[in-house]
Amino acid sequence: MVTSFRAIVELVSDNSRIFTGESLHLRCSIPDIHGSNWSVEWFRGSEKLPETGENFKLWNAKIKASGKFSCQGARKTMIGIIRTLQSVPVEIEVDGGWAILKPPSRSTLVGDTLKLSCRLRGFPPIHETILYKDGIEVMRQIGQNVSFYLSNVTLGDSGMYSCRVSWDVRRRTYSVTSVNTPVHILEVLSQPLLEIHADIKLYGAKKMKLICHVLYNARAPAPPVHYYFYKNNEQLGMAKSKNYDLVTKALGQYSCRVKVPQLDLVRRSKPSSFGDLPE
């Protein structure tokens, strides 16, 4: 038997990509408001691991330990074993190289400053670090600083990034390059998409439902969003706090507009036709 709630896996360590030989710590929590006692099972992909308990620690990691880790709660009851839904997995990568490019720990939004740090195995006397995007040099730094800052980023700054580090030992220069790391830049507010539902069984013969789909990625606490609906470019009623409206079924061109007044953001959908409009 499976419950309706899902276990939550958390990365306790700083990095989800680590060097071989390093350690990593994951923690599992069960959002049970009743405070029941749960045992915890761990998985890598579909493979059930022998480790149990709230904390999972990967010691002296090998490359083959890479994978998507998840956890699941289980407890015995009079009607059998009850399990939670498996957690959303956390992907762990064990790198056998000498350099790792560390991306931001949280999502990067348009207008943010993007920080990328090149982490090196050991502590050689670094004299140069280069940042690449899609194989093309973006920035070059001389000295020990291995962090790069890209200010006021746009969607065009998304891509595959890597870093190259060089140092000198006994009149010889050594260089190592990280594997590519994907970086995604998100819009705070995406362009909305209007969906029209006109199911007679759900809404009757005279009504239909307009749904305004949008991705809103503002930092918490996120300011409220206002939704506006239009028929043939004329506004239908007042602004809504929900992303849907029930309107009179009629032929026409429908669209929606999304506004976040506190952030001065406004986006509008492309028009969607309902019914056979005259040409």
Image (cartoon, rainbow, N blue to C red):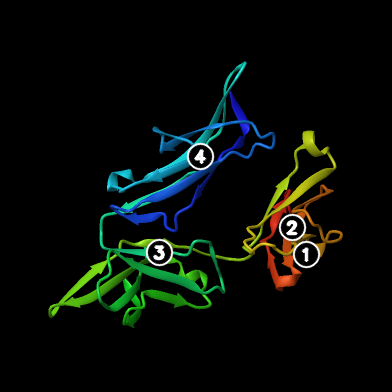
Q: Quadrant of residue 145?
A: bottom left
**Depth check: 106 or 226 in front?**
106
Q: Residues within 10 Å of mark 4 (few under 14, many from 20)?
A: some
**Element type at marker 2?**
strand
- Ranked by sequence position, the earlier of labels 2 and 3 is 3
Kindly identify the residue that appears in the image at 29 percent across and 44 percent down: 64
Q: Which residue is mark 2?
A: 253
Q: Residue furthest top?
A: 78
Instruction: Point out the image quarter for the C terminus.
Output: bottom right
Q: Amino acid at mark 1?
A: Asn
Q: Amino acid at mark 4?
A: Glu
**Label 2 to label 3: alpha-carbon separation:** 47 Å
Kindly identify the residue that appears in the image at 72 percent across and 63 percent down: 258
Q: Which residue is mark 4?
A: 54
**Label 3 to label 4: alpha-carbon separation:** 27 Å
Q: Residue furthest left?
A: 171
Q: Which residue is mark 1?
A: 233
Q: Which residue is mark 3?
A: 102
- Ranked by sequence position, the earlier of labels 4 and 2 is 4
Q: Residues within 10 Å of mark 2 (few under 14, many from 20)?
A: some
**Label 3 to label 1: alpha-carbon separation:** 47 Å
**Element type at marker 3?**
strand
The spot of residue 272 in percent (x, y) is 69, 55
Q: Is residue 213 above or below residue 202?
A: below
Q: Nearer the viewer, mark 4 or mark 1?
A: 4
**Element type at marker 1?**
loop
From where the camera sits, is residue 88 visible?
no
- Ranked by sequence position, the earlier of labels 3 and 1 is 3
Q: Nearer the viewer, mark 3 or mark 4?
A: 4
